[in-house]
Image (spheres, rainbow, N blue to C red):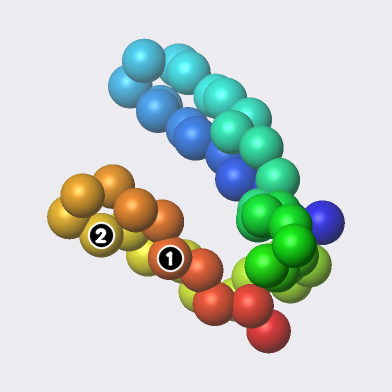
Amino acid sequence: MARVFSNDPAAGAYQFLGFVDVKRRPYYNWQAHVIKEMASGLDGTIYTGES
């Protein structure tokens, strides 16, 4: 399972933010296993591309 981490070298902070998954049953169930690309939007939304 793909995981998201936050790293701030200046503050010496490293944080595990959780697994990349969406579970909103009964509509869909999606979990990322291999993420090749990642970007963040201006509002802080994280976009990922699974390969």
In the displayed structure, does residue 31 sit left or right of residue 18?
Answer: right
Provide the residue designation for mark 1. 47
Give the residue type at disc 2. Answer: Gly
Q: Among all residues in the image, which is located at the extreme front?
A: 26
Identified at 58% across, 39% down, the residue is 5
Classed neighbour count for the residue bearing mark 1: other residues with Cα under 10 Å, few (<14), some (14–19), many (≥20) = few
Identified at 28% across, 47% down, the residue is 44
Q: Are marks 2 and 1 in contact (CB under 8 Å)?
A: yes
Identified at 64% across, 78% down, the residue is 50
Q: Which picture quadrant has residue 27? A: bottom right
**Residue 8: x percent and y percent?**
40, 28
Labels 2 and 1: the sequence-earlier one: 2
**Residue 9: x percent and y percent?**
40, 27
In the foreground, 14 or 1: 1
Provide the residue designation for mark 2. 41
Vertical placement of 18 versus 39: above or below? above
Q: Which picture quadrant has residue 40? A: bottom left
In the foreground, 15 or 20: 20
Q: Residue 4 got which mark?
A: none
